Amino acid sequence: MAIHKSLFASLLICLLFQISHGATKERLFSDLEKGALEVTAKPSRESVLDAGIDKLSITWKLSSTATKEAEFTTIKVKLCYAPVSQVDRPWRKTENELFKDKSCPHKIITRAYDKSPQSFEYTLERDIPTGTYFVRAYAVDAKDHEVAFGQSTDEAKSTNLFSVQAISGRHKSLDIASVCFSVFSVLALLVFFVNEKRKAKIEQSK
């Protein structure tokens, strides 16, 4: 009897866990309140941005059309891939089920919700891949569930985009060192030949 009770309790716990986990998985992006936050992302320069160097000036504030503000406790700001940088890249795929979505993997900042306009200056992380991006801010409730969002681009994700160039495998200091070493090697070789030629002349004069 005790064994049966233990098995029943274990099955009940597993069932409750699956139900809870399933409820979290079923949260859909299409269910979030769209445009509840007004978001802007201004790059530090107009040309392609360099990862690890350039910055974004990001602002967000409550939209006048927002209806779920009472549920907001936290704002999560993320860097998201534009459609052009998702082509043939399933690891960046947009999914309606939030737990599956891979379009916004880069966290920028998490901040407690404040009704007043907020801003943050973000230096692009060194590991940001080459691509075209926009910024999205999620409003999260007390259960850590996304309830609304806003983004720096339009619904089609085709405007106000910016491009980032990833850090290459080489660093400028290594290139400089390589050039200096090459110059030193050439000079050393010239000195060697001059010395050898002088020694040969001395030997001949003897």
Image (tube, grey):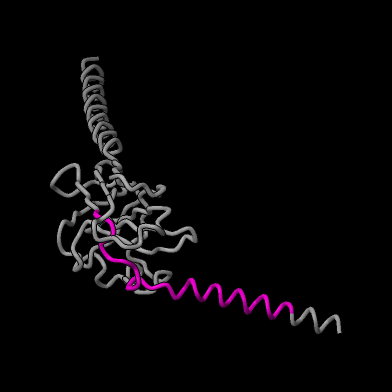
Q: Nearer the viewer, residue 181 or 9?
A: 9
> Which quadrant: the C terminus?
top left
Q: Is residue 123 visible?
A: no
Q: Nearer the viewer, residue 171 or 15?
A: 15
- Of the 4 image quadrants, the one containing the N terminus is bottom right
Farthest top residue? 206
Is residue 178 rendered to the left or right of residue 3?
Answer: left
**Measuring 31% from the left and 66% from the top, which residue is drawn there?**
33
Q: Where is residue 87 shown, x and y percent of the image?
A: 24, 71
Picture layout, residue 160 above or below residue 91 = above
Residue 100 screen position, x and y as percent: 41, 71
Residue 88 placement (x, y as % from top left):
27, 73
Residue 33 included in the magenta stretch of the image: yes
Instruction: Give the percent coordinates (x, y) of residue 176.
Output: 25, 34
Is 36 above or below relative to 24?
above
Q: Residue 124: in sight, yes or no?
A: yes
Give the residues in magenta.
9-38
Q: Is residue 178 magenta?
A: no
Q: Is residue 95 left or right of residue 201?
A: right
Which sits in the foreground, 186 or 14? 14
Q: Is residue 14 left or right of residue 51?
A: right
Residue placed at 35% from the left, 50% from the top? 108
